[in-house]
Amino acid sequence: MKALALILMTTLAHAQWESLPPLPEPAGGFAAGCVNGKIIVTGGTNWRDGTKRWLDTVWQFDPATAQWTHGPSLPHPLAYGAFASDGARLYIAGGADGKLGRREVYALDADMKLKHLADLPQPLAFAAAVVDQGRLQVFGGTADPDDWSKVTTNLVQVDLAAGTAAAGAALKGLPHGLGLPAMTSVAGGWLTFTGAWFDAEKQVHNSDAAFAYDSKSAAWKKLASYPISSRGAVAVLLDDDHVYLAGGYGSDEQGFLTQAYIYEIKADRYLPAKPQPFAATSCLVKCGDRIYLLGGEDQKKHRTAACFRIRVSELLSSK
């Protein structure tokens, strides 16, 4: 295993992130996805003159022209929602608008048309989501965006055709909830890694826990722990057996992270991977044969507009 890790590290050292035109404005906490071959970024937050701003903007990036264009605004500011894309639409569930938590589940298509699909049973922020078997699977998060002591490991399943939401099988393997987990779909279900919660004294704790959910049996399985206890890491499926995980925030001493790993699903192990080009809780989107790294929180009370991309084949070139 050590030899394999050394080979991977040596090969990935030659992989390069390509710098792209930045987001039209710095942002973090937004929803993003690949829709009909283009990348859509919606909402989020940033800071100006020490004041936190909640965004209702929609931007579209065309990989063919490397240009950003402005889309219709959201009906209200929106950040920290759970989101996922099936290639045809970007789905956004819950989040917050700067004043209160939201329950709406939206779908945004390639024509930049926004549709209200459903409502969650209650407001939900700092959750994560995947699309699986015609449902948006929304995991973790808190009903009160201002109170992380209320994060859960609940699962809400949104039927995208019927426009209904119902409780799924909650994760029972932890004594606490999770906010900001890293989540990605895989064949037959999905995976979730890391996250954070507050204890009774409202002290934040990061997690290294990882779990797999099997859609057929509706059962959870514990996986090997992530190498770093962190929150705000991001995950993207590279192929049927490899997940790229990167960034996030570690301890206060570590701060924002660049470290990245490739998780091998069959072997249930992590190997060092090409790190992010900057330290942040960012956003990863797979579009075509590339992975896009978009903006994020790179300092406390600060957001970045930086964007990069790298070919999937470069991250997997040792295989």
Image (tube, grey):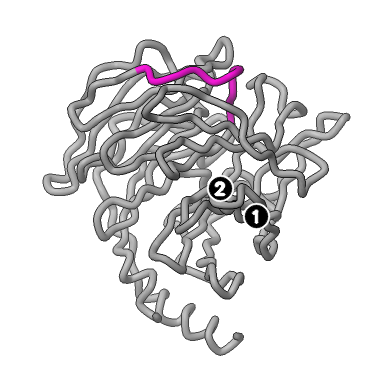
Asked whether the viewer can see residue 47, the reply is no
Residue with the most extreme left position: 65
In the rendered image, residue 192, in percent from the top left (x then y), is placed at 59, 50
Position of 191 with respect to 18 (left or right) is right
In space, the residues marked 1 and 2 are separated at their CA atoms by 11 Å
* Three-letter code for the amino acid on which mark 2 is drawn: Ala
Regarding mark 2 in the picture, which secondary structure is present there?
Answer: strand
* Three-letter code for the amino acid on which mark 1 is drawn: Phe
Which residue bears the numbered disc 2?
A: 182
Position of 56 with respect to 139 (left or right) is left
Question: Is disc 2 surrounded by few (<14), some (14 to 19) or many (20+) residues within 10 Å?
Answer: many
> Which quarter of the figure has residue 118?
top left
Q: Which stretch is magenta? A: 116-126
Residue at 55 percent across and 51 percent down: it is: 216
Residue 149 vertical position relative to residue 244 in the rendered view, above or below: above
Position of 166 with respect to 42 (left or right) is right
Residue at 26 percent across and 49 percent down: it is: 20
Residue 223 magenta = no
Residue closest to the eye, 183 or 283: 183
Which residue bears the numbered disc 1?
A: 211
> Which quarter of the figure has residue 149?
top right
Residue at 53 percent across and 70 percent down: it is: 264
Asked whether the viewer can see residue 115, the reply is yes
Residue 203 vertical position relative to residue 72 in the rendered view, above or below: below
Residue with the most extreme right position: 201
